[in-house]
Image (spheres, grey):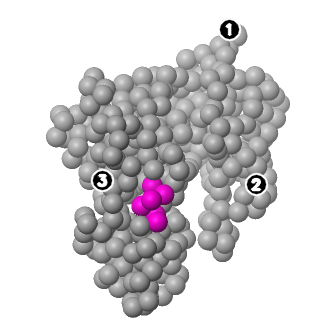
């Protein structure tokens, strides 16, 4: 079974082909340089770029794979959450393609696709606890099958990746700031007293990083008046040690918070011996170290997708679509696109027998 995956939830236009659980090929057009001019993603511009790239990327993918559209059995697309305009472009293209070539159609939960991505590289996923840490979401899930993924905790305001990027912007780091902040943190000395561990004085599994972002802004304001560094900062060598130490302290505050909530979730699900860490923040070096240490101490294992599968990509969408199609699921072409902030309904239906 061949599944075409389409990803357009934010600022990456990506398509990929998965056949029988194996990635055949993938293509991507990034908009990072364009949005860097504005310090963040401009939704209208992102939508127009998706419209410009979708058809050309599909033609390129089919050419490289030596296939035509009739060889696609399933068309899977990120239906949400994400930027509504961007999602609509990808979903409309996917629906037209499925209708035109007679393929089954599936709308994939973008967040679930991140969690399932490691399976594309041979990792065992079920049952597991899933920690999704990305620019828009910080969630905890119980994973029992591709179609049985239950949310245990969620983002209440700023997600971990959003906090990294916003604080990086306040620091004057080149866009996107989260990656460079991690690089600077590796050269700094963390002070546990500098920043709070937010939203831990409770007994739930939800996350809130807005207060930590405010604390970072309060620390940065007086520092910027006494210490100078280039803005935008592209090279870690140009950063003063005080900034590197602040990055290390902020990085550790975020990771400590993620690990404490993950530890709580594992305690409440004692049958789970595997942790899957996914999303853009899963590439963070300290998070990888701490998650590995946590699971080693508990006699379990941790699974990370490779860095190329941590950021938004179509391979994860194609793989998630393939898994769901193998279970016999599909969507009607009337399926709705779901933007960020709305719950994605469980509205898949059983495919008709051929």
The vertical placement of 326 against 171, above or below, is above
Locate residue 99: give its quadrant. Answer: top right
Q: Residue at x 67, y 31 (%)?
A: 107
Q: Foreground residue, 176 or 321? A: 176
Q: Residue furthest top?
A: 353
N-terminal of the pair, mark 2 or mark 1, is 2
The residue depicted at 25 percent of the width and 64 percent of the height is: 192
Crowding near pointer 3: few (<14 within 10 Å), some, many (20+)? Answer: many
Q: Residue 45's x, y, as percent?
A: 76, 62
Picture coordinates of residue 149 (x, y %)? Answer: 48, 27
- Real-space CA distance between mark 2 and mark 3, rounded to the nearest whole angstrom: 36 Å
In-image side of 162 versus 202 (left or right): right
Identify the mark nearer the N-term, 1 or 3: 3
Q: Quadrant where the N terminus lies?
A: top right
Residue that badge 3 annotates:
256
Q: Mark 1: few, some, or many residues within 10 Å (few <14, many ≥20)?
A: few
Q: Residue furthest front?
A: 201
Report which quarter residue 330 is drawn in. Answer: top right
Q: Position of residue 247 (x, y in %)?
A: 36, 71
> As displayed, is residue 351 above or below residue 310?
above
């Amino acid at each position: 079974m061949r599944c075409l995956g389409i990803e357009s939830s934010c600022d990456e236009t990506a398509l990929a082909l998965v056949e029988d659980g194996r990635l055949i090929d993938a293509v991507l057009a990034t908009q990072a340089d364009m949005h860097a001019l504005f310090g963040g993603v401009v939704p209208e511009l992102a939508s127009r770029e998706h419209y410009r790239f979708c058809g050309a990327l599909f033609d390129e993918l089919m050419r490289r794979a030596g296939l035509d559209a009739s060889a696609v059995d399933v068309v899977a697309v990120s239906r949400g959450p994400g930027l509504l305009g961007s999602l609509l472009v990808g979903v409309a293209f996917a629906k037209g393609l499925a209708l035109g070539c007679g393929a089954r159609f599936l709308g994939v939960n973008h967040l679930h696709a991140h969690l399932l991505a490691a399976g594309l590289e041979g990792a065992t996923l079920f049952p597991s606890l899933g920690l999704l840490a990305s620019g828009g979401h910080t969630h905890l899930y119980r994973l029992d099958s591709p179609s049985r993924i239950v949310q245990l905790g969620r983002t209440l305001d700023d997600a971990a990746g959003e906090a990294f990027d916003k604080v990086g912007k306040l620091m004057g780091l080149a866009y996107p700031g989260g990656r460079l902040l991690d690089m600077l943190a590796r050269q700094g000395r963390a002070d546990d007293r500098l920043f709070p561990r937010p939203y831990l004085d409770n007994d739930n599994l939800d996350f809130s990083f807005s207060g930590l972002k405010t604390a970072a802004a309060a620390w940065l304001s007086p520092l910027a008046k006494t210490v100078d560094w280039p803005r935008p900062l592209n090279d870690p060598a140009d950063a003063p040690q005080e900034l590197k130490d602040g990055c290390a302290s902020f990085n550790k505050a975020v990771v400590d918070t993620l690990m404490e909530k993950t530890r709580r979730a594992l305690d409440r699900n004692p049958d789970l011996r595997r942790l899957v860490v996914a999303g853009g923040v899963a590439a963070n070096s300290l998070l990888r170290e701490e998650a590995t240490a946590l699971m080693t101490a508990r006699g379990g294992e941790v699974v990370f997708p490779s860095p190329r599968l941590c950021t938004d990509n179509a391979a994860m969408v194609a793989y998630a679509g393939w898994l769901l199609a193998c279970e016999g699921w599909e969507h009607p072409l009337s399926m709705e696109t779901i933007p960020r902030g709305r719950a994605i309904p469980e509205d898949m239906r059983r495919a008709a027998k051929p």
